[in-house]
Image (cartoon, rainbow, N blue to C red):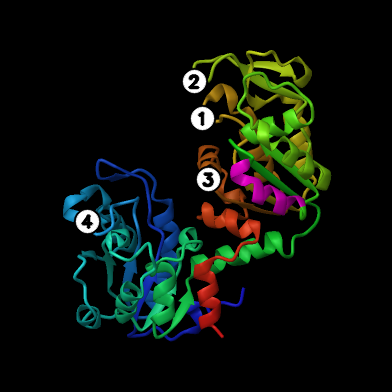
Amino acid sequence: MTVRSMQEIELSGKKVLIREDLNVPIKAGEILNDARIRAALPTIEYALKKGAKVIIMSHLGRPEEGVSIAQQQAASLAPVAERLSELLAINVNLMSADFSAEIAANLNPGTCVLLENVRCNVGEKDNSDELSQYYASLCDVFVMDAFGTAHRAQASTHGVAKFAPAACAGLLLTGELDALHTALAQPEQPMLAIVGGAKVSSKLMVLEALAKKVDHLIVGGGIANTFLAAAGYKVGKSLYEADMLDKAREIMRQTNIPLPKDVAVAKEFSESASAEIKAIADIAEDDMILDVGPETIADFVATIASMRTILWNGPLGVFEFDAFAAGTEAVARAIAANSGFSIAGGGETITAIEKYRISEQISYISTGGGAFLEFVEGKVLPAVAILEERGL
């Protein structure tokens, strides 16, 4: 990617507006997982160390645009400002909607403020020029660092980059783009992709794109059930998409998709359900496939061990239920043990990585969900495209 990095720009004494993705889960005012905040720290700390006047903006949840934070307190970034203050060991003030260019100019170098939830601002979603120009008026340098929102052309991700005096990528964004480039544009062979999820239709473009790039494609969850049905197997009352069978067959003709030989089934979708291991040919009409079986796990682990590049998005089974977590755990640990390059992305994938405590063994963990998938699909990310234009 030919985007300019913040490391190429003089930041000392400058007003630096950084778009981060600090959209963390919050319950009763308490942050449940601060991984996204921690991922943003290197960029913020770099700007502070260079003596910049740092202004951070982010979204949180899906608040109603044009409605004040006072009327939707659950959307406030106050808990995030508090957590940032702790992690940065400086006071990070939360600024209201009337934050102005004059206030920004009077900040002291080496200080940091956080603007309230950008999704409350009228024109954010529609990428309005008026709001974009307001953001641009706050800064000398705009730093886009929110990879998780890079697929959205909004005022705080795209529009501001058009009007800011200078626009560049933060350390997190450049790291994401470099990792994805390594995995997709210049992968060391052989390459494996693991794609789990409920529906083929929701990840069809990802599957089609990867089928052209990888040597092996392991599918999991409801996606695997659709491929099993496409191959002529009965899947009982398992989740699958009957209208996607032809698409599944087409993808199977393009690359090697090792289908499960055995699976863990139950009669109901319940955390208290007992797992029964069955060969694929023995699935009953009232069986629900909720995980892969031990023979399949052994095959998948052996395949993973022989790979040099691995892309992982999605669990193999209902790993939230301990009885049906064996496949996802085994695959996660096999990826961790692999000495090649591995990149993982997506909410459930990150949850699994944290559950099995293997984050240090994955080469790169993407902070993006939709952006990660759209990049894999080969789509242009608007927030990256505008940075490329500004970098010319």
- Pointer 4 or 2: first along the chain: 4
Distance between mark 4 and mark 3 Cα atoms: 32 Å
Look at discs 4 and 1 and give the one toward the viewer: 4
Whether residue 204 is in magenta: the answer is: yes
Mark 2–mark 1 distance (CA, rounded to whole Å): 8 Å
261 falls in the magenta region: no
Q: Disc 4 residue type? A: Val
Q: Are marks 3 and 1 in contact (CB under 8 Å)?
A: no
Marks 4 and 2 in Cβ contact (< 8 Å) = no
Q: Which of the 4 quarters of the picture holds residue 159?
A: bottom left
> Which one is in front, 62 or 36?
62
Mark 2 — residue? Answer: 271
In terms of image quadrants, where is residue 160?
A: bottom left
- Majority secondary structure of magenta residues: helix
Compared to residue 100, the image places residue 127 above or below, namely: above
x, y percentage for residue 275? 61, 16
* Disc sitting over residue 350 in the figure: 3
**Mark 4, residue position:** 67
**Secondary structure category for the residue under label 4:** loop
Look at mark 1 in the image and give the residue it sits on.
320
